[in-house]
Image (tube, rainbow, N blue to C red):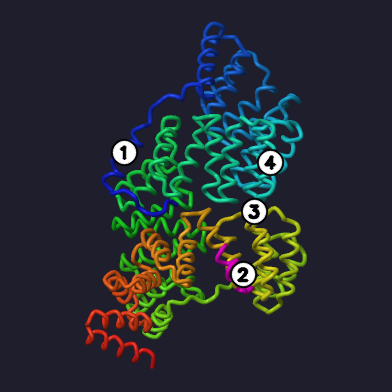
Amino acid sequence: MVPGRVWTSTLLTAVLTATVLAGCGEAQPNSPRRAFEERRAELQAAIADNPQAIAERVELTRVAIRLGDGVGAEAAVKGALAAGGNPAALRPLLARAFAMQGEGQHALETIDAGPIIPEMIGEAAWVAGDVHLDNGDLDAARNAYDRAAQELPRSSALWVDVARFRDANADTAGARDAVDYAIELDKANSAALAYKANLIRTEDGLNAALRWYDAALAVDPDNADALIDQAATLGDLGRYRDMLVALRHAATIVPRDPRLFYLQAVLAARADNYRLARSLLQRTRGEIDDQPGFMLLSAVVELELGGEAVAATWADRLLVEQPDNFTARRVLAAANWADGDADGAIEALLPIVDRSDADSWSLLLAGRVTSELGQRGEAGDYLARAATLTRGDALPFAATDDYRLLSMAADGQPLNPAKAIPAIGADILRGNGARAIARATLLRDANRGVAEAHILLGDAALADGQFDLAVQAYRTARNLDASERSTLRLAHALFRAGDAAGSGAAILALRESEPSSTAAERLAGHLAMDIEHWDEAIGHFDRVRARIGDRDVVILRELARAWAAKGDETRALPLIDRAYRLQPLNAEIMTFYADLLDKRGDRQAAADLRDKAAQIGR
C-alpha cells in the first residue's frame, strides 16, 4: 500500500511505538462524539433515578449505536424490555445491537422472532440488509435495502449503506448516486462524506479524495473510519508523518481496531523493520486474518525473517481465495525454494511462467528450480526467455471447457457474467471476435454503471483488433474507476490505435492521481527516455527502484543508460554491472556494459564481454 521509504528503521520504530501506545484518550471538544458521550451520561443518571424508565433506555440504545457500542446498545434495549417496553417496537434495535457485535445470524433470528410495529419495519429491513451484505448474500441484501428505502426514503444514514451495497455489487455509478443523495439529505453526515472520499479515491485518485476526508473530519473529528481511511490514503501518497497523526488520533477512539496495527505494520515493512511489522501484525489478534492484504503482508514478513514454512502457509491461504494472485505465487515459490522444496516452488510458478507475458524474475527462478530438478531443457528455455527482457502479450481470457457447452450456457443466460465471460474467452480463442464483442456488449448495456463491464468489452475489442471501440470502452471504465486496471488498458489501447501522445497523457494522469502506482512510474520513466529527458527518467526509475529494490533488470539498465547519456559513467557502471549479474545471458546488456568499460579504459574486460555476447547471438 505505502510506497517508498522516508525514515530510518530506528526513527520509524520510535514513532510507531508512540502511536501504538496512544491507545487512551478522549473525544475532541465540541465533537459529535463528545455530545453523544455527554448525553449517554445524562441518560444513565436519569435511569439510575428511575429504573423503570423506558423512553430514556430506548434513547440510550440509539446513543450507544451512534457511538459504535454494540454491547452497550444490547444492555440498554434489554433494560427497556425488562422495564415493560414493547418487543414489537424494540426488536429491530436489539437486532442492530447483535449485528454490531458480529452476531449476524442472531440479529436475523431476532427480527424473525415476532411481529414488528409498522414504524420500525424500515429499521428491521435495514439491519437485515447490513447482515446480508456482510455475509456476501447480495440478492438478499438488495431486497432488504429496497424495503428499507421504501420505508425510510429520507434517511441519510441508510443511503450510505445502500451506497456500500452498490459498491460491493460493482455498481460504481449507483454507489456514487446513493452517497450523493445521502449528502444531499444531510450535509453534516460525516459517514457519507467519508464514503464519498472512498469512492473518489477509486474514481479520481488519492489527492482528490483528501478534501472529502477533510470535510468528513471537519463535521466529526472523531470519525474513526474516516481517520483510518485518510491515514491509508496519506500513506499511499508518501505522507507518512501525516498518516501517523491520523492513526494516533484514531487510536484514541478505537484503540483495538486491527486496521491500526495493520497499517503500521505496512510502514514498518517498508522501512525493512520486519520484526516490528511481525509484532504489529500479531496485535491484530486474528481479526483480519482473512483479508488478502493481511495474508500477503504476513507472507512477505515471515519470508524476510526466515520463516519460510510460515510464509508458504500464508501464501497458500491467499491463493485459495485468489488463485490468480501472481504476487502471492511468487512469494510462495520463493518460500518453497528457500525451504528446499523445489517441486513446490515450480508448482507455484507454473501458472505464471506458462503465460506468454511471464516476468523475467519468475522465469529466472523457474530456470534455477528446474535445473536443480535435472530438467535441463526446461531450464534452458526459461533462462532464454528471461534473458530477452521482453514480455509477450497476455491473453485477456482463458477458457478450458468445451466450446459448445460454454456457448450454450451463455446463450441461455446472456446477462449472467459467470456464463457469459467464459464464452467470450472461448469465442476469442476460436477467432470469433464479433461474437465475443456482441456478448460483451450485452453485458455492458445491462451494467452501464459497472466499470468491469466496460473493461470486458474493451478486452474483447482489443483482442479483435478493434482499437477505437476498445479505447471508447476503456475510457468509459476509467470515468468510473481511474485506477491502474482501467487506465493502463486505456493507455495500451491508445498506443495500439496510433495515439502515442494520448497514451502518454493517460499514463501521466495515472501517476498524478495515484502516486503510489509503480506501473505508472515505470511507464513515465520510459516515456521520458523516449524524448531524452534524462533527469526526469532517472527520477521516475529511482522511485521504482526504491519501492522494489535492485531486482528489476530493465529498471537498472534504463537507469544506467540515462546516467551514461548525461556523461556520468561512474554512476552508470554499478547499475549495469548489477543488471548483468541478474541477467548474464542478455547480449544487449553485455554490449552496453562493454561500451562503458571501454570508456573507462578497461579494454580487455570489454572485449571479453563482446565475445560472450557474440557467442550468445550465434
Q: Which residue is mark 2?
A: 493
The dot on residue 17 is: 1
Whether residue 255 is situated above or below residue 49 in the rendered picture? below
Which amino acid type is shown beneath numbered disc 4? Ala
Mark 4 or mark 1, which has the lower sequence index?
Answer: 1
**Tag 2 and tag 3, C-beta contact below 8 Å:** no
Q: Quadrant of residue 423?
A: bottom right
In magenta, the rendered stretch is 496-505
Our reading of the magenta stretch's main secondary structure is: helix
Neighbour class for label 3 at 10 Å: few (<14), some, many (≥20)?
A: many
Q: Secondary structure at mark 3?
A: helix
Neighbour class for label 1 at 10 Å: few (<14), some, many (≥20)?
A: some
Which amino acid type is shown beneath numbered disc 1? Thr
Residue 379 coordinates in the image, percent (x, y): 38, 81
Residue 138 coordinates in the image, percent (x, y): 66, 47
Residue 497 coordinates in the image, percent (x, y): 64, 73
Q: Which residue is mark 4?
A: 178
Gap in angstroms between the C-alphas marked 2 and 4: 32 Å
Q: Secondary structure at mark 2?
A: helix
